[in-house]
């Protein structure tokens, strides 16, 4: 897709978006890799070697067992996206890279937290659980484990809230993303 | 056909056309050395695995075919990491087969176990750990394919001992199944036409030729491009020989120790046409001040080079030979339809530009005190040795170097006329490269004379491969520019550390290079007198059955000029002291 710039020049879509939108703080990359020995280490090693910073990283098998998908959030400050992508493309086991602008993406992440409680879940925590559509996975007299799947910014809010309880453990998976429906197939 | 994994490996190497292996055996690779006895491939037993790696690089650089080295696990493998890194930097097709402990022992800190695929991840184009003997033919095919296609580079095949001993079937297919590897080849014609538009408007063009032109065997295409445009050109350290130095349009080497004309032409250019070069910091100097007025056409087969350092106005991702030919084909189409490439005004500006460049070339040559005067009484000038070697060499002679001052003088003063006649360690700057690389070059091109210009420091790092040369009858010739110093480092201390010399003195007499050479089965000469340089070169050139080592006692304090100090702008180039007044006038 190409659009016209203010000067009337034909420019590529990515460039056009750069003109209109503020630079994102992070880039979303969905990297399809061959399911081969050491492939995660190759991808992670490349980031380390070239000085690109990873904000988060998640790996999972795809619908085709020959391939996996690595979802990486890259710190936009640490490197120009174009260099990150072209260096990644040089890895023999990297088959395809999809870039998503955060504005065009549905981003989601999973949070698990175990909190100390005194017999019952305190009412403000209960409210937060409802508000953030979190779930109670397990509960005892002294502890409760909750999960929440949501956009990373929502999880940041929730995590802030949870800080006022005593957190025994808290894990986040790192985000994954898909294009918003309006961009599907584009 | 049932055979062992080791036999399958040997058969697969033969199948891809390997003729020579450089290597040294050990425990984990023992099973592979056994069927090697029956193989048609020649194995050259090196004295250190670093030698095997650089020899394979030298072989690859002069033949255009992949170099192959074989080492054992653990220390054998780690000893070849430097050549892998060297080949990675300079895009040399190198295939290293390394022994590995048995798959069942991997991860147990077994004897001579190292995680070699892990260690070499950052210095190889790709690597493989073989775990299934049935996959050996496929992996060998892929390894050679990856090493030699696209932007060439080194690969490692790590080969566990139990895989070598296992029974397997061998069958061959030429199919390649690498879904993530699609090296580009042909240029996008829209980009080529855009490039031609810039070319047709250029008033002060410079063609910036890099190692990619050598790798793509594109010297003929380059010559045609230059003949059609009459554009001036420079050849980087990796591209020496891509175009004859004797041609007046050739300005020489750019960069930190490049010629004044080459460096300054780039600085003042309005169009820089890069063919297979990567805007290395040793060429650009201070990046923000590099060729500030130039538009850039960047032709490279590696898309990651585009915009890595300097954002081009026209990127062309393609094999250099195909890209250059596409450009000249377009030019031919223009002239067939009676359109001229340049209008009258542009032509006139280009003429003035060429006159300016010719003047710079004449005014600021590579100068040194006592040039052209072999009868002077002082110590031998290292530059004189290179000039006399070059003058005595035929055009097929291959020149190999180590790393340091001698390397720069060799590159500056040798008159190249053919591609693949120059072998040097560029991106990594690996001391000790010359002797083993010369050995590999001579093995690859046995009918050509191979001279190495080496430093005394470098020579001491890998000289033991001359024993290999003597034993295997590989008659290379080594000219040591013996300045008794780690000269290049000494030059920096002299110029930038107030002459505080810290750990750079070596001694001219220790070791005794002539005795050392003789003990390794070579002929050794020593030359102290500038008047004897040419006669000893003549003697060395007449020896064809043994390696020759010449210990040239050269001026300890000589410096390489011109020089752009590290981090400085190319505009601040320092020429030889004898030319400074002239340069001041020019400015
Ligand atoms: C393996 C290695 N170690 C250190 C260096 C740093 N270094 C660059 S040039 C040089 C001096 C080389 O000395 P010599 O071989 O005598 O050559 P010269 O400069 O004297 O001609 C050194 C130490 C290097 N390039 N490679
Ligand atoms: Mg020296």
Image (cartoon, rainbow, N blue to C red):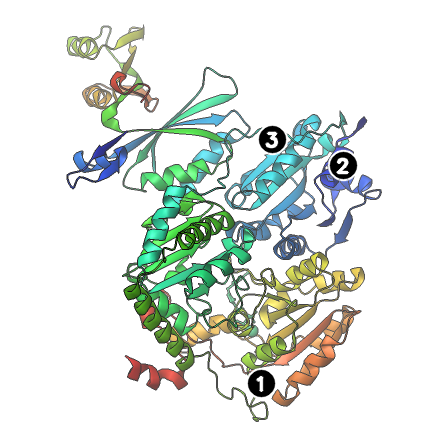
Q: Is A128 in front, or is B116?
A: B116
Please name which of the two marks, 2 or 1, marks the residue nearer to the observer.
Answer: 2
> Which badge, 2 or 1, comes first in the chain's sequence?
2
State the SS at label 3. loop
Q: Is B560 in front, or is B200?
A: B200
Q: Residue at x 64, y 33 (%)?
A: B139
Please name which of the two marks, 2 or 3, marks the residue nearer to the observer.
Answer: 3
Q: Residue at x 76, y 26 (%)?
A: B168
Q: Residue at x 74, y 61 (%)?
A: B446
Chain of the residue on which disc 2 is drawn: B
Chain of the residue on which disc 3 is drawn: B
The answer to whether B540 is drawn above or below residue A113 in the figure is: below
The answer to whether B57 is drawn above or below residue B191 in the figure is: below
Q: Please tell me if label 2 and label 3 are on a single chain.
A: yes
Outermost residue toward the right?
B38
Chain of the residue on which disc 1 is drawn: B
Q: CA distance from mark 2 to mark 3?
A: 18 Å
| Quadrant in the picture for residue A136 | top left
| Beta carbon of the mark 1 residue lies under 8 A of ligand 2 | no
User: Which residue in the structure is indicated by mark 1?
Assistant: B380
Please name which of the two marks, 1 or 3, marks the residue nearer to the observer.
Answer: 3
Q: Please tell me if label 1 and label 3 are on a single chain.
A: yes
Q: Residue at x 48, y 42 (%)?
A: B186
What numbered label is drawn on residue B11? 2
Total numbered labels placed on residues in the image: 3
Which quadrant of the figure contains the N terminus of chain B?
Answer: top right
> Which badge, 1 or 3, comes first in the chain's sequence?
3
- Where residue A99 sits in the image (x, y, percent)? 33, 30
User: Which residue in the structure is indicated by mark 3?
Assistant: B176
Q: CA distance from mark 2 to mark 1?
A: 52 Å
Tag 1 near tag 3, CB within 8 Å: no
A173 sits to left or right of B113? left
């Amino acid at each position: 897709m190409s659009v016209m710039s203010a000067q009337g020049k034909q420019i590529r879509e990515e460039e056009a978006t750069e003109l209109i939108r503020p630079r994102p703080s992070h880039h979303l990359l969905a990297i399809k890799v061959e399911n081969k020995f050491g492939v995660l280490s190759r991808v992670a090693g490349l980031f380390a070697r070239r000085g690109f910073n990873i904000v988060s990283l998640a790996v999972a098998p795809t619908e085709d067992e020959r391939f996996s998908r690595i979802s990486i959030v890259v710190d936009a400050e640490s490197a120009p996206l174009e260099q990150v992508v072209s260096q990644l493309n040089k890895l023999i086991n990297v088959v395809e890279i999809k870039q998503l602008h955060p504005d065009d993406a549905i981003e989601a992440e999973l949070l698990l937290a175990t909190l100390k409680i005194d017999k019952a879940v305190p009412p403000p925590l209960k409210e937060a659980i409802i508000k953030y559509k979190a779930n109670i996975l397990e509960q005892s007299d002294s502890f409760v484990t909750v999960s929440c799947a949501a956009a990373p910014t929502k999880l940041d809010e929730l995590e802030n809230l949870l800080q006022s309880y005593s957190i025994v453990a808290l894990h986040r998976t790192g985000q994954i993303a898909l294009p918003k429906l309006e961009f599907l197939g584009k | 056909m049932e055979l062992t994994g080791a036999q399958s490996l040997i058969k697969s190497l033969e199948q891809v056309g390997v003729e020579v292996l450089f290597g040294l055996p050990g425990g984990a690779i023992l099973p592979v050395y056994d069927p090697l006895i029956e193989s048609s491939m020649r194995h050259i037993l090196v004295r250190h695995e670093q030698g095997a790696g650089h020899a394979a690089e030298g072989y690859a650089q002069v033949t255009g075919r992949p170099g192959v080295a074989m080492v054992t696990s653990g220390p054998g493998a780690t000893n070849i990491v430097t050549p892998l890194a060297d080949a990675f930097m300079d895009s040399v097709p190198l295939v290293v087969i390394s022994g590995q402990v048995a798959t069942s022992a991997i991860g147990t800190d077994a004897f001579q176990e190292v995680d070699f695929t892990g260690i070499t991840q950052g210095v190889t184009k790709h690597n493989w750990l073989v775990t299934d003997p049935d996959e050996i033919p496929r992996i060998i095919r892929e390894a050679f394919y990856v090493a030699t296609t696209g932007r060439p580079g080194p690969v490692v095949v790590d080969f566990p001992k139990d895989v070598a001993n296992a029974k397997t079937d061998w069958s061959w297919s030429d199919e390649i199944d690498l879904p993530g590897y699609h090296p580009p080849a042909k240029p996008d014609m829209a980009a080529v036409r855009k490039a031609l538009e810039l070319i047709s408007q250029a008033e002060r063009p410079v063609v910036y030729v890099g190692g990619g032109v050598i790798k793509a065997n594109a010297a003929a295409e380059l010559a045609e491009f230059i003949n059609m445009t009459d554009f001036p050109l420079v050849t980087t350290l990796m591209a020496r020989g891509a175009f004859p130095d004797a041609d007046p349009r050739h300005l020489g080497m750019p960069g930190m120790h490049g010629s004044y004309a080459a460096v300054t032409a780039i600085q003042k250019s309005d169009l820089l046409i890069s063919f297979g070069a990567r805007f290395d910091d040793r060429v650009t100097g201070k990046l923000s001040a590099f060729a500030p007025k130039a538009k850039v056409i960047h032709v490279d087969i590696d898309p990651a080079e585009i915009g890595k350092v300097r954002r081009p106005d026209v990127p062309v991702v393609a094999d250099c030979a195909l890209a250059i030919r596409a450009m000249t084909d377009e030019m031919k189409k223009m002239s067939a339809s009676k359109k001229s490439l340049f209008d009258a005004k542009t032509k006139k500006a280009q003429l003035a530009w060429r006159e300016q460049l010719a003047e710079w070339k004449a005014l600021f040559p590579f100068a040194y005190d006592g040039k052209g005067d072999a009868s002077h009484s002082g110590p031998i000038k290292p530059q004189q040795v290179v000039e006399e070697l070059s003058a005595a060499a035929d055009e097929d002679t291959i020149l190999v170097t180590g790393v340091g001052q001698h390397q720069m003088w060799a590159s500056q003063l040798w008159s190249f006329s053919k591609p693949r006649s120059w072998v040097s360690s560029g991106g990594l700057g690996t001391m000790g490269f010359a002797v083993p690389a010369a050995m590999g070059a001579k093995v690859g091109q046995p009918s050509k004379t191979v001279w190495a210009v080496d430093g005394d420091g470098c020579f001491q790092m890998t000289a033991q491969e001359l024993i290999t040369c003597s034993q295997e009858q590989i008659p290379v010739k080594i000219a040591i520019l013996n300045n008794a110093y780690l000269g290049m480092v000494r030059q920096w201390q002299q110029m930038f550390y107030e002459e505080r010399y810290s750990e750079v003195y070596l001694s001219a007499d220790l070791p005794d290079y002539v005795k050392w050479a003789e003990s390794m089965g070579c002929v050794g000469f020593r030359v102290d007198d500038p008047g004897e340089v040419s006669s000893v070169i003549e003697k060395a050139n007449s020896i064809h059955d043994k390696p020759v080592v010449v210990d040239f006692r050269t001026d300890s304090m000589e410096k390489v000029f011109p020089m752009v100090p590290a981090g400085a702008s190319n505009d601040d180039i320092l020429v030889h002291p004898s030319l400074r007044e002239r340069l001041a006038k020019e400015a």
